[in-house]
Every structure is written in C-alpha cells, then in structure tokens.
Amino acid sequence: MVKEVQMSIKMESELRDQFMAVAAGRHRPAAQIIRDLMRLYIAESAVPNALTAETIRKSDQNEDVFHASSAQDLFKKLGI
C-alpha cells in the first residue's frame, strides 16, 4: 500500500499559472507531472548515473577511448 502525503511548494504565481496551463493543455494532472519530474531528478542524481556507468564500462573495455598528445589534439579528434 502506498501512503500518500501532501507537499507545499512556494513559487511565483506566473510560474504556477504557466505550468497549470501546459498541464491542462496536455490533459495531464499537474501532480502527476511533478511526481514524474521528482522521479527523473532522483534517477539523474544517482551515483553513478546511467551515462556515467556506461562511460566507465566503455572505458574499461577500451571502447570510445580517445588518445591525444594535447588538449588541442583531443578537441580536434572530438570535432570540437
């Protein structure tokens, strides 16, 4: 059983109005969007996050590894 709790958030009235308008326009409850955003924030805050974990895995397997003689050489190889 999921216990539901309430939460209060202080924000500018203009921000709230814009958010509510977008939520209504997409036919989604504002509370559901907030829960989704919270889940996304938590997932992205995980250490290491999915991108970091994948990068470490690739590095350990010598995939997508760039060797450069200088920062300028590295930027050139990365197309920056």
Image (cartoon, rainbow, N blue to C red):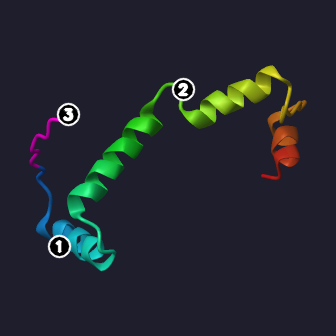
Closer mark to the observer between disc 3 and disc 1: 3
Task: Name the residue carrying label 3.
Answer: 1
Q: Hey, what amino acid is under mark 1?
A: Asp
Callout 1: 10 Å neighbours few (<14), some, many (20+)?
few
Image quadrant in which the N terminus is located: top left
The span from disc 2 to disc 3 (Cα, nearest Å) is 30 Å
Identify the residue under disc 2.
48
Residue 2: percent from the left, percent from the top?
A: 20, 36
* Left or right of residue 65, residue 12 in this image: left
Residue shown at 53% from the left, 32% from the top: 49
- Find the magenta span and give its range: 1-8
* Amino acid type, callout 3: Met
Q: Nearer the viewer, mark 2 or mark 3?
A: 3
Please give the residue where the numbered disc 1 appears in the rendered image. 17
Under mark 2, the amino acid is: Pro
Residue 3 magenta-highlighted:
yes
